[in-house]
Amino acid sequence: YNLYLQGRYYCSQRTDAGLRKALDFFEKAIAEDAQYAQAYSGLADAYSLLSHYGVLPPAEVWTKAASNAAWAVLLDDDLAEAHTSLAHVKATQDWDWHGAEHEYQRAISLDPRLATAHHWYAATCLVQLNRLDDALSEILLAQTLDPVSTIISRDIARMYYYRREFDEALEQCDRTIERDPYFSGTYWILGLVQEQLGDLDESIAAFQRGIQLVNDSRMLRGALGRVFALAGKSSKAKQVLREIAELSTERYVSPFEPAMIHFALDEVDRAFECLVKAQEERCFELISLNADPPFDSLRSDSRLRAIANQM
């Protein structure tokens, strides 16, 4: 259990190094007890997050995440964490929203106080189903259950962002940064909110602060390139595209990042080529497609509708 808790601690950091350490601790727990269902749940979540945060390609982790989640449920069908992991896989890998909802609700019925179940139910399932009132209620409940979680606090700002309540999102970002000024993920959503408010200089500053904290974050670099393009700094945006292309020769980079830069550069055909590739790879970023504000101007485009319909 001690090893398992350490794995969960490193998972919560949402960094390359942290997630790799989490894998190590969960595997050590399994070495101590091969029937320890919680550790398999932890492994499933760590593998999924390694994909979501751009450390490993989705295809490389699908089988590992799914098999560990399924094994956790088989070992202990009454373990809420196991059903949460399985729900997470169904949502983020299978795009089986209703199957995911069933598993999340099963997890919550087993342990109503499991904050992660409420958190991920909101972020990976209810958002894509466009049930944003329910999503906000679930994420706020998650915070009540785990008031010190930085990632939950950050994702409350995401819920306000999806609801187009940008002032509330901005205030939530400020509260999260006050709690933990070194969590780079908060600067990512802060930059997105400021982009929607039209404060492009502030948006650039937020992304740059996040990059200072985690230099190899492809999410932050891609978002920075997009805002450069929106601010008329096309040469800087194209430089980011070149950097992303170079980085992709060394490690996995989601096609979603260049897609968003190409959209901002008004290179729509090229952007959709990248977006279709992101769909083929089942990139994590697409699970908020129905709610994501940058796509509002593209809702009438048949190519976007086709992607949304297939999801």
Image: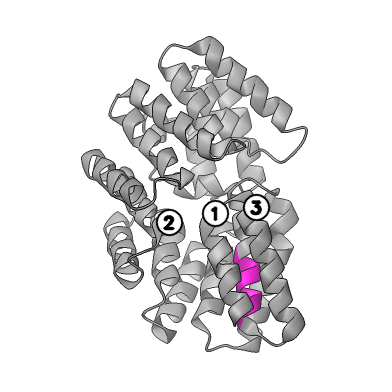
The answer to whether the residue labelled 3 contacts the one labelled 2, judged by CB atoms less than 8 Å apart, is: no
Q: First in sequence: mark 3 or mark 2?
A: 3
**Other residues around mark 2 within 10 Å, as few (<14) / some (14–19) / many (≥20):** some
Which image quadrant is residue 9 in? bottom right
Q: Which residues are magenta?
A: 38-45
**What label does residue 229 carry, if any?**
none
Is 262 covered by the magenta stretch?
A: no
- x, y percent for residue 291: 38, 45
* Depth order, front residue of 124/220: 220
Please determine whether, in this image, residue 39 is positioned above or below residue 168: below
**What label does residue 17 carry, if any?**
3
Q: Residue at x 54, y 18 (%)?
A: 237
Locate residue 278 relative to residue 224 in the image: left or right. Answer: right
- x, y percent for residue 144: 29, 69
Locate residue 290 relative to residue 238 in the image: left or right. Answer: left
- x, y percent for residue 257: 57, 33
Name the front one of labels 3 and 2: 3
Is 41 covered by the magenta stretch?
A: yes
**What label does residue 151 carry, if any?**
2
Give the structural element (helix, strand or loop) at label 2: helix
* Cα–Cα gap, marks 1 and 3: 9 Å
* Cα–Cα gap, marks 1 and 2: 8 Å
Give the structural element (helix, strand or loop) at label 3: helix
Q: Which residue position is annotated with label 1?
A: 14
Badge 3 amino acid: Ala
Please determine whether, in this image, residue 162 is positioned above or below residue 39: above
